[in-house]
Image (tube, rainbow, N blue to C red):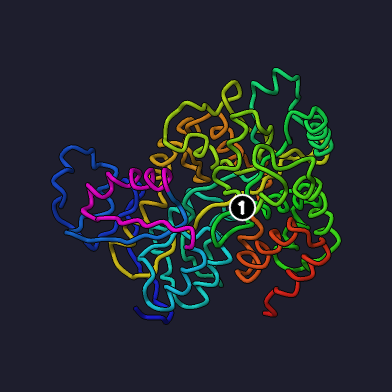
Amino acid sequence: MRLTRHRRWAVPVVAAAAVGLALTACTGDIANEEAADVDCADYEAYGTFDGAEVTVGGTILDLEADRLNESWADFETCTGISVEYQGSSEFEAQIAVLAEGGNAPDVGFVPQPGLMNRLAAGGWLIPASEPVEANADEFWSEDWKAYGTYEDTFYGAPLMASIKGYVWYSPAEFEEKGYEIPKTLDELTELSETIAAEGDHKPWCVGLESGDATGWPGTDWVEDYMLRLHGADVYDQWVNHEIPFNDPQVAEAFDAVGEYLKNEDMVNGGIGDVSTLVTEAFQTAGLPILDGACSLHHQASFYETFWNPEGGDENTVASDGSVFGFLLPPVNADDPLSVTGGGEIVVAFREAEEVEAFRSYLSSDTWANNRVSLGGVISANKGVDPENASSELLVQSIEILQDPETTFRFDGSDLMPGAVGADSFWKGIVAWVGGESTTQVLDTIEASWPAS
């Protein structure tokens, strides 16, 4: 595989009346005989291919990976392209090494714009084709498109999205005990202290373990507090290193989070003491809520999938169901809505017509609605019908992302250079909950920031 920068793979954009955006390099009959059982009208624009294969890598695993495969099954049938997806919890740590060695998959679902920038700077990425960029312009905001852009070159459209500031809880417990949804951060503290004082269980359950990425759920806490305590401008200065990582405002956010994560009275409900935060997998950490062993769990909208890991519906996500979520509240009840979130950027490592056909499909409203309808996720694609979402909470999440009044900021660690956002920040969280002081941890992270 060439390790130099590649030219843009240009494809003509068809007339707006056509369904989707055409990739005209391949023509002919539908290769897959199963197409007779599928309505292929939505897929005609992508062309037909005889025995082509596209390999895909990412961090998405288990049930979510199964739903991914289902989301493009009709595309495979109608275009003749076989899509082979392989998920790995070590994807972020390994992808640059694979790319440098010429062994990267054809397509990568990169969950960090900072990592995408590193891959682009290495000359390993193929710029997005015109149909992909046209979809990004039509279906995403300028901010979202910017996350897939490096040095004025557009490399990939977003895929899915998440809102990271949810606090999951049991509606039945709240009703039984008379708890109110907190409207401010002070009210959240009061609620937590009330639950702790009752003595039945620790109020919060937390899991930071995630393989090579252990620590990232803790960074989400800090990012939520940075945005709420100091606002979007300071948040932007922080992730762009216009203020140092050991700035007093960052320390304030860490210490506010520490009132929960480093407090034996607050964690780790149903699991153990503070030390278990770094050994408990993030996928299972919230489940003690279902047993009444904790009351609160901070995790993104995508956590809906983990309440029913086998794909059943025994634990309903609804305001009157088994579990539901409220957004981490603001400092003041009348503050404008500000949320952090994340997503994936669909990048390509191989220049091929079938790769761009697949990327064009993933950037469309057709794919976004197909995947959202399968459950458990949301998308910031403006062509998504919120009612296609699988729960009341996810409908709300899509509406929040589509609301022009919402202040949205991408996950801070995902925007930072990989040496920080995917290394020292994660490791710093682990050291911090393990006993290191805020000052020690912030100084160490600041020292890791690349000089240029």
Q: How many marks?
A: 1
Residue at 30% across / 67% down in the picture? Answer: 352
Q: In the figure, 448 relative to 137: above or below?
A: below
Residue type at mark 1? Thr
On the image, the x and y values in percent for residue 383 come to: 46, 41
Q: Is residue 71 magenta?
A: yes
* Residue drawn at (60%, 58%) of the image: 214
Q: In which quarter of the image is the C terminus?
A: bottom right
In the image shown, does 35 or 203 lie closer to the viewer?
Answer: 203
Residue 132 appears at what percent x and percent y? 41, 58
Q: Residue at x 83, y 30 (%)?
A: 197
* Position above or below: 241 against 73: below
Q: How crowded is mark 1: few (under 14 residues within 10 Å), some or many (20 or more)?
A: some
Range of residues picked out in magenta: 62-90
> Under tag 1, what secondary structure?
loop
Q: Which quarter of the figure is the N terminus placed in?
A: bottom left
Left or right position of 108 against 415: left
Residue at the location (40% across, 78% down)? Answer: 101
Relative vertical location of residue 196 with respect to residue 452 in this rendering, above or below: above
Image coords of residue 258 (percent x, y): 79, 50
Q: Compare residues 394 and 98 and report the one nearer the observer.
A: 98
Which image quadrant for residue 37? top left
Is 110 covered by the magenta stretch? no
| Residue extending farthest top | 176
Which residue in the protein does label 1 denote?
Answer: 279
